[in-house]
Amino acid sequence: MNDNNKVLEVNDLRVAYNGTTVIEGLSFAVKRRDILVILGPNGAGKTTLLRSLLNLLPYQGDITWHAGKIGYVPPQELLRRQDIPPLKLSEFFAFKTSDREKIEAMLCAVGLDVRCLQRQFNELSTGQFQRMMIAWSLLDNPDVLILDEPTSGIDIGGEETIYSLLQKFWQKQNLTILLVTHDLHVVWEYATQVLCLNRQEMCMGEPDEVLTPEQLKRLYGSGIKFYQHRHG
Ligand code: ADP
């Protein structure tokens, strides 16, 4: 792989909590403009991996970013909207920029009415909240966007899902996306690469190569129902 084309290199990553190893011997690379989906059962270490990549956790091994800005949309549960101080959206966005035009343009781009700037977090629907978080994370034009399980089933308005919204931005700008999801439909529709993680075990490749019944069974055990994408 051409070095210029790599946005992230992970080498022999090991992460432990209080001496208990959660990720071990993990090595992979991500190319610019990949949409990498990280798949794995609960407890596989997906969130731990993302948090290590963001330098939020101590780790061993090497994590090398060849990227300027990295945007992060944490999991919905982490945000626990009821615990967020009663900020208006306009105040929240002011942490990022004072450029009101830029904020309004970004809100329009994610399909939100600019009048919602006068609202507080708890006045937004879940779908609106997700759109708002995407707008927030994209406001300073990151090279990489990292998302931890954006709620997959939620229709955020019309036919548009959080994933088609992300894909729209991905098509328009030079964005690389790293995404944790449980939704295999998302993998088939949007992923350019898939990383299967189960603590130490892993496989990586294009969806067609990786999402075989055998691999999924290895990853999730026999309980998984295989969903085969049919091309056109
Ligand atoms: P996933 O995102 O794939 O569900 P996580 O990365 O959240 O998995 O967790 C991987 C393992 O690490 C789990 O066994 C979990 O219990 C453990 N773990 C996660 N966070 C902590 C923490 N802060 N302290 C101790 N153990 C943790």
Image: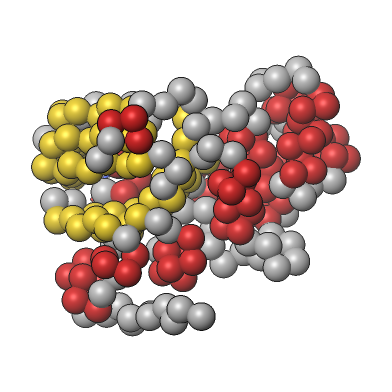
- Viewer-closest of 91 and 205: 205
Q: Which residue lies furthest to the top in this view?
A: 98
In the rendered image of this protein, does residue 208 appear above or below residue 100?
below
Residue 37 coordinates in the image, percent (x, y):
38, 54
Along the horizontal axis of the image, is 73 left or right of 105?
left
Q: Position of residue 193 (x, y in %)?
A: 35, 55
Query: Is 44 or 164 nearer to us in this picture?
Result: 164
For image coordinates 51% across by 39% down, the residue present is: 175
Image quadrant assignment for residue 173: top right
Residue at the farthest right position: 115
Expressed as whole percent of the image width and height from the top left, the position of residue 112 reads 79, 47
Viewport quadrant of the N terminus: top left
Picture layout, residue 121 above or below residue 44:
above
Q: Where is residue 203 in the image (x, y as percent from the top left)?
A: 20, 58
Residue at the limit of the structure toward the front, as seen here: 2
Residue drawn where x is 38% and y is 80% of the image: 227
Q: Is residue 91 left or right of residue 65?
A: right
| Quadrant of residue 230 within the rendered picture | bottom left
Query: Residue 118 or 99: which is nearer the viewer?
Result: 99
Q: Is residue 53 left or right of residue 116?
A: left
Q: Residue at x 19, y 76 (%)?
A: 214
